[in-house]
Amino acid sequence: MNRIVAPSMLSADFGHLERDTRMVDASAAEWVHIDVMDGVFVPNISFGFPVLKAIRKATPKFLDVHLMIVNPEKYVKRFVEAGADLVTFHYEASDDPAACIGLIREAGAKAGISIKPATPVEALRGVLPQVDLVLVMSVEPGFGGQSFIPGSLEKVAQLRAMAREMGLGMIIEVDGGLSSHNAGAVYGAGADVLVAGNAVFGAADPQAEIVKMLNA
Ligand code: DX5
Ligand code: ZN
């Protein structure tokens, strides 16, 4: 798969959400990453359906929704209705990942599963054949602007090896602390999609930073 950058709208200026979404729409980023936090699964609250709908109106690009919420199965259908092309939920937040994947697919979107830094990739072995994507968190979920946890590189490599061994072609996405400084190493370890919040929206030229990440 070609390299993809997914700017995280969590770092956008919410007073100018349409402007920032259109900036991403006009950039080399193929995906747009949407972080939903409930204040329970993570110690922070971000936004939900109305904001997702507003972003959907401002771009036809692939909307990659990352749910950091408890009981994801209760809400996945509504996120698809609000415009998600892919819905990723946390392995740690679901009692029945297979059922949650089924609900996302039934609603008409692709399904992803995510693991926090302390969760080993091995925990996903059973569910891997069913998912379109695995999201490896390279910071503790909850906040933008944190530093990349170096051990995440090894997890990406392990996951890539596991996929090869099992004959699977799922997408591997990495999220947290990424920029053009470490993008080359993370793509090199086997990642397909890199999420970036602060690096993109904090750059003097966000569109140039996206290109730099793709070429890192
Ligand atoms: C963290 C979110 C990330 C975050 C990334 O919980 O899942 O998507 O916005 O932000 P940066 O790139 O600033 O680490
Ligand atoms: Zn995220």
Image: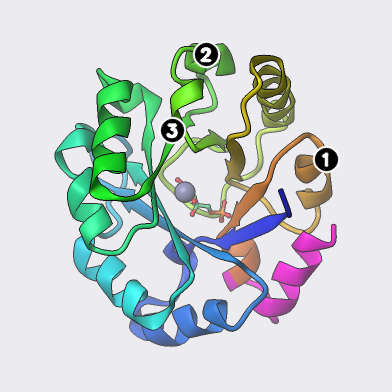
Q: Closer to the N terminus: mark 1 or mark 2?
A: 2
Q: Nearer the viewer, mark 1 or mark 2?
A: 2
Q: Nearer the viewer, residue 9 or 3?
A: 3
Magenta extent = 201-216
Is 213 one of the magenta-colored residues? yes
Q: Which mark is residue 188?
A: 1
CA gap, disc 1 to disc 3? 21 Å
Is ligand 1 within 8 Å of the beta carbon of the residue shown at mark 1?
A: no
Rendering coords of residue 28 (x, y %): 67, 73
Taking 47 as reference, is 174 left or right? Answer: right
- Cα–Cα span, label 3 and label 2: 12 Å
Residue 125, numbered circle:
2
Given residues 200 and 104, the one toward you in this image is 104
Q: Amino acid at mark 3?
A: Ile
Q: Where, by quadrant of the figure, is residue 174 drawn?
A: top right
Q: Is residue 139 magenta?
A: no
Left or right of 5 on screen, residue 90:
left
What residue is at 32 percent from the left and 80 percent from the top? 57
